[in-house]
Image (spheres, grey):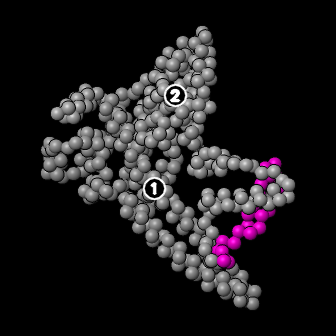
Amino acid sequence: MLVTTHLNTDNLHCHFVVNSVSFRDGHKFRNSIEQHRELREISDAICKEHGLSVLADAPFYGGQSKGAYWKEKKSQPTHRQQLKEDIEYCLRYSSNWEQFIRQLNAKGYSFDPTRVSVKADGWQRAVRLDRLGYPDEYLDERLDRNAEDPEFRYRYQEHKPHVSSAGVLMRVVVEMDQMRRARLPLSQAYREYQPRKDPRSPVEQIMDGLICEANHTRDTAVILADAILVILLALIELISHYTKEVILTAELRHELQNVAQFHSDYRFLKDNRLHSVADLEKEVAQTESRIAALDQQRSKLRNRVRHETDPQILSVNRAQRAAITTEITEQRNRVKRVQRIRKDTPRLLNLLRTELRVEYEFKHPMKNTIKDRSHLAEMER
C-alpha cells in the first residue's frame, strides 16, 4: 500500500494506492465503509508516528448518508434539504404554533408536539426539528417575529394552509383506465364492470388493473416500469396547470422534481422495448453477458499489444482495444441505468399507492369513518 498526501490544494487530503488483490490470501479488495475505516486507522497511525494531528472520530460523508452525500456533490436536492425547504416555507407564513402545524399538515407532514418532530406518509421514523437546525428557541423567535410584523397578515392571506381536494392522481388513473377500456372488446369491458367484493378502494383497483392489463397478464407480482413512468409524467403535466400545490404526500411531491430523469428513463425504456421488471432483469443479464464477451476480446488484444513488434499492427491493435473499452464502458453504464430503474420502480409504485390512499381518504372521509367504526366494533366483539 502507498499513502500519498496532496499539499497543492486548499483541502489537505490523502490518497491510498492499494493492490486490489491481496498477496497473502488472494482475496479481492472490497471498497466498503469498513475498509475505509481500516485505511483511516493506518493513516492516523502514520500521522501520529510523525507527530502530526489527526481528525479523531470524524464522521464519514460529513455525518450524512452516502446517497445524500453524493447527491449534494452532484448539486441534487437531498431528502434533508427538501425537508428544510418545506420547514422554511411553513415558518415564513406562520405567526404561531397552530399556524405552523397547519402549514406542515398542508405540506403532507404530521407533527409530534412532544418530540417536536415531523413525519410524512411512508417514513419509518420521524425527524426532530432540532437536528435540522431548528431548536425550540429559534422556532419561537421566528414565529414571534412574524407576529410583530404588520405586513405578515397580507403574506399569510396569500399562503394560507390549504389541503387540496383536486385528487390529481385519481384523475390521471381514472382517465388512463377510461382510455384502456375504450380499446377493450365490448364483452370484456362488460365483465370488468360487474360488481365484485374487493377490499381495495375503487381507485386502487383501477391502479392495479392498469398495471396488470398493460402487461397482458394477471400476475400482480409483475410491476410495469414504463406504466409507472407514464403515470408520473401525466401527473406532472396535470399539476403544472394548478396554481397551488395539489400533491398531498411530501415524498411524492419531492420525487416529482426529477421530471427530466423521468422523461429520459421513459424514452430509454420505450426505445429498448422494456416494460416489466422481468424485462429489466433479463436486459441486465444479457448486457452483462455482452460485457463478458467484450472483455475476453480486449484481453486477447492486450496480449497481442504486449508481444507485437510491428508498429503498424500495434497501432491497429491499440485502436481496436480502445474501441472495445469504450463499448464496455457504455454497456456498463447501461447496466447501471437499468439496475437503477429496477430498484426505483417498486419505490415509485409505493409512493403512487400512498398518494392514492391519501387522496381517496380525503375525498371520502365518511367511508373511512364507517370502515374504522366497523373495525372497532369487530374488535369489541
Q: CA distance from mark 2 to mark 1?
A: 33 Å
- Residue at the image point whose x is 61% and y is 79% from the top: 298
Q: Which residue is mark 1?
A: 343
Corner quadrant of residue 297: bottom right
Q: Residues within 10 Å of mark 1 (few under 14, many from 20)?
A: few
Magenta stretch bounds: 1-24
Can the viewer see residue 155? no
Can the viewer see residue 68? yes
Tally of numbered discs: 2
- Quadrant the C terminus occupies: top left
Reply yes or no: does residue 2 show up in magenta.
Answer: yes
Picture coordinates of residue 150, whole percent (x, y): 60, 9
User: Between residues 217 and 16, which one lies in front from this camera angle?
Assistant: 16
Picture coordinates of residue 181, whole percent (x, y): 23, 47
Q: Residues within 10 Å of mark 2 (few under 14, many from 20)?
A: some
- Residue at the image point whose x is 48% and y is 49% from the top: 262
- Quadrant the N terminus occupies: bottom right
Picture coordinates of residue 3, whole percent (x, y): 77, 64
Mark 1: which secondary structure? helix
User: Between residues 17 and 318, which one lies in front from this camera angle?
Assistant: 17
Q: Which residue is mark 2?
A: 116
